[in-house]
Image (tube, grey):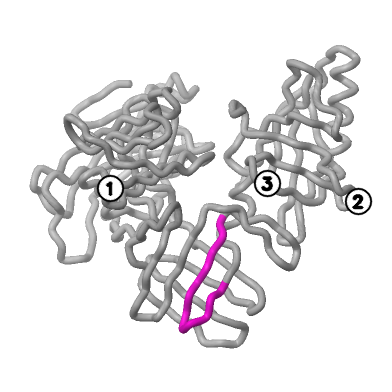
Amino acid sequence: MLRLAGLSLVTFSLLGLPAVARPVEGTLTYLARIALPAGAEIVVEARGVQDALLAETRFATDGQQVPLPFAMTLPDGVDATLRAAVIADGQTRWVSDAVSVAAGEAPVTLGEIVLNSFQPLGFTSTLRCGETRLRVGLFEDRAVLDTDTARLILSQVPAASGAKYQDPADAGTFYWSRGATALVSLKGEQLPECVAVPPDPDQPYRARGTEPFWSLTIAGGQVELIPNIGMAPVRARLPLAGLEGADFVFDMASAGMVLRLSETVCHDLMAGTPYPQTVSVTWQGDDLQGCGGESIDLLAGIEWAVEDIDRAGIIDASRVTLAFDAVTRRLAGRGGCNRYNAAFDLSGEGLSIGPAAATRMACTAALMEQEQRFFAILSRISRFDIDPTGALLLYSNDQQEPLLTARIAGQP
């Protein structure tokens, strides 16, 4: 990686991008009359297709206040999305909306980019550790570390410098904040040095429940609860999260409302559809129970390794995988011999997968037979679930037992 006067630039040739580059510049500001804290740092990320990092600029404010100019260099002929943030004490304080830069060759002047106060839903920092992105939330003497495949509750331990949080059951799992950087180790495997980066674009968070039929939305730092069909919405500003056990708790006393988010798979009572979180809302003495997040979040962004096909296991050393893309609604992976892809549809009613298109490599007869069974089963899938061990189970409506069982690749 090449560093030039505060600009950290990914080598374009490593990404298969053109070596020719063009300058991009702009100015960052915000509307609130609040001074930037001492030690604040500006980070601007440019990301491309499949979220590939194209370039980054990072610099200390050194007591300067907004508006703050920035400059970076992007490859020619590549679309990019920029996001800027103000980081202080390793935590995001202000963040911009995504700014698109169309492919081209001419220099780009973006003008003024307005930052908004960051309202975290429990996680105050996003880290990039090499190619790994993590989220961290700090709560007095504990930290919550989210790796996308696991949520870890760490306890503060003595450290020679900075603040270190460690898994009470595994000294090889820790988060160690050291000012502008951090060290993260997962089960004894230390990741490359971590730096704070702009969080992923904010998406509305939704929760829902039945008996009564209630719904809750969090967007732009605001919470809106509709306690039952036909009732007027109850609104409140999203407060900082508290941590009770492993649950995020948001106490909105002004609205008489307490929201609790538990990282436990929840099933809709009507259709049995799984969702990432179990949600409870206490409002005016009522206890509303339901599910939160989106079902696709249980599937996407993970490579699943199939370990059983129609209760017959799989051939030793064969590799059969599933990778769901939330944006394109495509499923891709390895069938054991060939690579494949297929369209899929996910709704509150279930999961369906279209016919698989595959490459045409030839393998042993046993592998080819297993692959054809796998492809045939994909087209029969009508619903999915996640079992208590974290395994992905894929069913057809006419079967009580799963037709496919998979686990996160690389995990036992």
Q: Mark 2 points at which residue?
A: 398
Q: Name the residue under label 3.
A: 386
Q: Which stretch did the figure color magenta? A: 277-288
Compared to residue 204, the image places residue 378 above or below, namely: above
Compared to residue 267, the image places residue 141 above or below, namely: above
Q: Mark 3 falls on what kind of element?
A: strand
Q: Mark 2 and mark 1: span between their CA atoms?
A: 50 Å
Compared to residue 31, the image places residue 182 above or below, namely: above
Q: How crowded is mark 2: few (under 14 residues within 10 Å), some or many (20 or more)?
A: few
Task: Tell me which residue sits at (86%, 49%) in the image.
Answer: 400
Q: Mark 1 and mark 3: span between their CA atoms?
A: 32 Å
| Residue 329 in sight in this render | yes
Q: Residues within 10 Å of mark 1 (few under 14, many from 20)?
A: few
The residue furthest front is 169
* Pick the front one: 34 or 138: 138
Give amino acid for label 3.
Ile
Q: Mark 1 falls on what kind of element?
A: loop
Task: Tell me which residue sits at (33%, 54%) in the image.
Answer: 96
Q: Residues within 10 Å of mark 3 (few under 14, many from 20)?
A: many
Q: Mark 1 points at which residue?
A: 141
